Amino acid sequence: MPQTSSSRRSGRWRNDTRRTAFGETPWDKPRPTSFTLDSGVSLRLVLLGETPWDKPRPTSFTLDTGVSRVKYDQARWTDDSDDLYEPLLSEKASKTVDIEDSPLPDDLTRDSLSLPDPAEPELARHYTRLSQMNYGVESGPFPLGSCTMKYNPSFTEDVAARADAAIHPDRPDSTVQGTLALCHRLQDYLGRIGGMDAVTLQPPAGAAGEFTGIQIAKAYHDHNDDERSEVVIPDSAHGTNFATAAMAGYEVVELPSGDDGRVDIEALEAAVGDDTAALMLTNPNTLGLFERDIEHIADIVHDAGGLLYYDGANLNALLGRARPGDMGFDVMHYNVHKTFATPHGGGGPGAGPVGVREELAQFLPNPHVRERGGNYEHYEPDHSIGKIHGFYGNWPVLLKTFAYIARLGDEGLRDASAKAVLNANYLAEQIEYEVPFGPFHHEFVASAGEQDAADAAKRMLDYGVHPPTTKWPEIVDEALMTEPTEGETKRSLDQLAAAFNAVAGDSDAELADAPSRPAAKRIDQATAARNPRLSWQALDDT
Amino acid sequence: MSDSDSHATGSPYAPQTAAETAAMLDAVGADDLESLFDVPESVAFDGEFGIDTRSERATRREVARLLGRNADLSEFLGRGHYDHYVPSVVDDLASRSEFLTSYTQYQPEVAQGFLQALFEFQSMLVELTGLDVANCSMYDDATALGEAATLSQRVRSVSGDRILVPEHLREGKRAVLSNYTEGPDLTVEPYPMTDGVVDVPALSDQIGDDTAMVYAESPTVRGVIEERLDAIGDLAHEHEALFCIGSDPIALCLLERPADVGADVVVGDAASLGTGTAYGFGLGMFVTREEYLRQVPGRLVGASEDAADRRAYTLTLQTREQHIRKERATSNICTNQAWVALRTAMHAAWLGPDGLVELAEDCVTRARDLAGRLDDIVGVKAPVHGRHHFREFLARTDQPASAIVADLAAEGFAVHAVDDHLVQVCVTETTADATDEFVAAFREVAK
């Protein structure tokens, strides 16, 4: 990674986006006009928003929450038109370069290259404008269930951007002792946090961690000449679990949930047998419920000769409270963008370290890092499954993970899980939607009841917050899977609850028309899928 | 400020004061935080991790101290991971929190910015390859190759389970491919190369109707520009096998368009634009023909319209993906390298087509010039292969390669040892300034 100074982060403050909801508002649309003021700061901001050229513009939007809730919109420069919000780079400045007089023979080269050609000021304005049409954790509440969208500490970016971290992966071990030492320490920390004996940092995301873990389970059974063909997965599990098992060549046995939303022990006993390679389980599960019978579940799986796999997606709920290793899990992955606050970057990069108990360490991916007499080295575990990533995984993300864990330590990690669980419980208490299953931990699944959950989510966008995950898990009708994380204050949770409750009181028509306030209005998904246009070259295709 | 208002304990990123915590506990009817956890005592953790809490400053100093143990080397290294100069504006714009701290675009109405940027990224790859459909990222080149192999099995009209790959293939890539092909019962077989390029007659003997995919690289792992891609593609298609080309986005700005030599899939690592060296941190490209659209792994961004009849972008064709299709998904990938793709698009746009072509041409001439200078050294022959090269090349040394690598490291330079007397050298604009010293050091260690 190129070295950058701390001015990188300060760049964020050169614009107004921290202080706005999102998106510009078309000036020709009538908007709610009432607003409350409670401070000089708010007043100043409102005045800013009230002077869009010569057109007076109603500014804000108030919810009667008992909490100060002035919202405002900052006037913004836009390059939009009647048919689009922001031109593509290719529509702003494009150029075709003919390949001539190249140092290669003509038959080895292409004829020409046509690509955008913006000058740097245009480029900066383009992406700044795009960022203003995007909602991140720093934009406001982001209670996307199962995704743990908590605040990403700024300083970890500076840690990852260090020049001495920007090294090539093919250097001899003796020249990268710092990197190996840090990896070794992170392996150790993660092992302690998960109650695991050995950890690999190689998987570049949670799903890659699952694949690693299932390949390890396969290698373990193969090593014992024990052919097994099935992986058992509860119906409420993440989709990646099913896809991972299939990718590794296993048949998936889907386990129905019990009436209480947890693993149905009888169903498990019926599903598990000589063919069971592993049971993949999330705990707390996607309803936020702790699998209270986890030791019994582990016994059932182990007695049948299978392994117990822990999906680390919900580990944030348990930091310092319970460890997968102590519950009987044999192999697990950690989702560092969830549990350890590395930024999700609009879809990635993540990292999915995998922990195993002692007996499985011999199957870990190649290479693994160990310490020998104060020095660190790569080595190949005896029966390694081989490689999961072309090099060593997502190193910059691992650096951020290390920095976060070191910053929090025991005390901070325990506090994170406590506040995450408290926030979820408090928020659930404040919202009018029913929450059918409990006691839950870091997340809960409310039901939108008679409303369509997806429409309710779109309507929440109009209230300036990111909505929960919708329509999943299916065990709850019109599910609103909600995870506020520890990063919200009581005040922001009250505001978030007010948004939920406002939507709960809105009519079906209002929901169906939503959203009206984000950058874009409701997007036509059916057309996008029926007539795929996946590049600017294809825009004119019909 | 009283203690009850303090944020001082616990996580610095959990902002509740003690008073707020008390009020919230009261609201939910709990006595204390512990009582919120429904964890049976037998599995509750009552120990300590033994991880000390540090201040932000102390944490940064600790990382600085650790990484200070890394030797400061001028890296003439490549083989799939490259260093190119990334302009400050890429760091600055990509670090905007609206991009960096956002999630996958499940609510496209508040994610238009990232979606448009990914749509632009996809479009750039379409231009570079001449193929129709680019996804918006796999983890790296190795996993993209693994996904291409499984795609070949899904789309091939006749049965076949052999994946043919060049004998000169980065070991990390081969090892990942081996894991990806194990589940679907595909067999990976190396085919021979001659003097750095594909031995087409040998490949012709080896290929058969049970071949699902033929993979070839240009530039190869040794930096050689493959000269007979069209012949390889013809062979693959004669046997109804997919033809997959591995390359990188800078090389593709200059080399033959993969579509023009019959490529069905293009994979590779695109992090060479936008990221620079980061210990192997990658960005998998995956580009293919429209006819395979519904078998593509990973995220796809498409254009649509919103209720105001304006163009808008959204993730599309999600029925291919794991969160909808579960065990019948085209891949298990969920979190990918979206933010890295954002950086790549920014860097490509910053360079523009002139800058990209110039950079690619420099990759040819710099390698040529450096090889020539090393070849002048007694005890060194470079390049080993009498071919055109891109960024890097092999040199044969009279001294053992391991000794060359160790002795150069002592002088502050890093190169690859490829075989007993073969080293590999890569040069880009970030190491160009150190070339004179490098050549001088090489002269000393080659004696």
Image (cartoon, coloured by chain):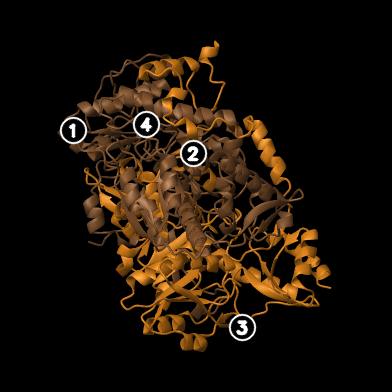
Q: Is mark 2 on a helix, strand or loop?
A: helix
The residue lying toward the viewer, choosing from B178 and A470, is B178
Evaluate whether label 4 is on the same chain as label 2: yes
Chain letter for mark 3: B
Chain letter for mark 2: A
**Image vertical order of residue B435 relative to residue A189, above or below:** below
Q: Where is residue B100 in the image (x, y as percent from the top left)?
A: 47, 42
Q: Mark 3 points at which residue?
A: B195
**Image vertical order of residue B366 relative to residue A467, above or below:** below
Measure how far apart labels 3 and 4 are at the Cα level. 64 Å
Measure how far apart labels 2 and 3 are at the Cα level. 50 Å
Residue at figure coordinates x 44%, y 54% from the top left: A306
Q: Mark 2 points at which residue?
A: A339
Evaluate whether label 1 is on the same chain as label 2: yes
Q: Which comes before the other along the chain, label 1 or label 2?
A: 2
Chain the render paints orange: B
Q: Mark 1 points at which residue?
A: A510
Q: Label 2 crowding class (10 Å Cα cut-off): few <14, some 14-19, many 20+?
A: many
Q: What element carries label 4?
A: loop
Task: Quadrant for residue A58, please give it.
Answer: top left
Q: What's under tag 3, amino acid-wise?
A: Asp
Residue at figure coordinates x 42%, y 69% from the top left: B149
